[in-house]
Image: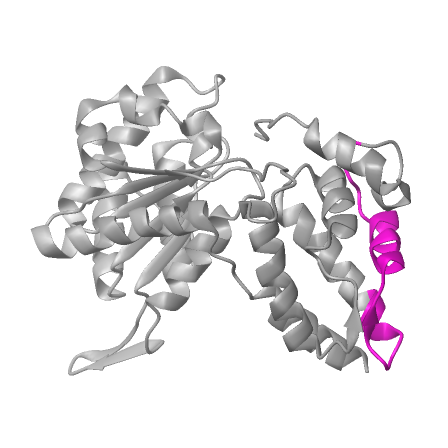
Amino acid sequence: MESDVQTIVKAFKAKIVFHPRYRQACSQIQNAIENTEALGEPVCALLRGPSGTGKSTLCYYFRKLHSGDSVIRRDDGTYVNLPVFYCEVPSPATVKGLITNMLRLLINDTPNGTIEKLTHQLVTCLKTSQVKIIFLDEVQRICFTSVAEKIRLDSLQWIVSLLNISGIPVILSGTNLCKDIRLADEAFENRYPYSAELSNFTYAEDGGSDYFATLKHLDIAMYEIAGLAKGVHLNDPTIAAPLFVGTRGNLKRMRLIINDALKTCLRRGTPRELKLDDFFTACQYVDLSKNLSVGNPFALSYDDSLKLALGCEEIDDD
């Protein structure tokens, strides 16, 4: 029973909804990849937005989209095939720390040497692994006010150098702290003509909003994957409003509550009927750090939750 529940929840978790802003961000990254191939030089994109809006999920989507055989067999041996390479900027951010992080993931060991030597080793490993796209996440760590200006410029100039030497596009992803990062260096700015921004949802009573459209797509997927017989729906206003109140429209926190509500429903056995109480139970065990209400949002009346949702101002969740 429990393994069946975990399988269903895992399958539902893998469902990605491409609402308009998400589709636009995906398109900008795809433009960078396609133009790199067409022009023969790296064209890059910056993806930014508050934590929990789907940036890492988008990175994962491109990893799946461009995945291939895990190994390549050539005349001179067998090599790892890694079309999409993902790495986080370390904290604290330094050029050497970033190179070391990237190499550690590629060679499963901690390298030593000068920045010049490590860069050469990194480019060799990237080409040997057939890397076509690099995703550098948490790039806002270069932009913290505590990071010295020299370290910031050194990091950006090193990324430009990596682009020039390797010819591989580097997609940068981070919070809104990095929104002005392209202005810090002209050569860096020229390499990043594409910029995509994700944000938390806003609430509107219009059922055609991005928020309600996303909930509807998730609802259809959930009912299909879990084989639910009947019950409440995610895009019902009585579910959508308190769900927004508890999360301020943050996609990651929304999905956590929905997943926990689904698990509660499935563990009751058959018939599989999703109830409002399942969401109340889910919110009892989740730390709702951005909760607009005092206490469980699913304990509110619909009118109270609607008032709080409509009165919410968008926040920068860095």
Q: Is residue 313 above or below residue 149?
A: below
Q: Residue furthest front?
A: 206
Q: State how the image is colored.
A: one colour
Locate residue 111, reporting x and y percent.
37, 50
Q: Residue at x 22, y 30 (%)?
A: 188
Question: Along the horizontal axis of the image, is 169 left or right of 233?
Answer: left
Locate residue 132, reporting x and y percent.
25, 59
Does the magenta run of residues contain 132?
no
Residue 129 seen in this snapshot: yes
Depth check: give the residue in front, 262 or 136. Answer: 262
Question: Along the horizontal axis of the image, is 124 left or right of 210?
Answer: left
Q: Which span is picked out in magenta? A: 264-292
Depth check: give the residue in front, 56 or 100. Answer: 56
Depth check: give the residue in front, 110 or 14. Answer: 14
Q: Is residue 5 above or below residue 90?
A: below
Q: Quadrant of residue 225?
A: bottom right
Q: Is residue 59 above or below residue 141?
A: below
Locate residue 110, reporting x and y percent.
42, 51
Residue 289 seen in this snapshot: no
Q: Quadrant of the N terminus?
A: bottom right
Q: Residue at x 78, y 40 (%)?
A: 288
Does the magenta run of residues contain 282?
yes
Q: Residue at x 32, y 45 (%)?
A: 171
Q: Quadrant of the C terminus?
A: top right
Q: Is residue 78 above or below residue 163?
A: below
Question: Along the horizontal axis of the image, is 68 left or right of 32?
Answer: right
Q: Quadrant of residue 112?
A: top left
Q: Residue at x 19, y 55 (%)?
A: 34
Q: Residue furthest left?
A: 39
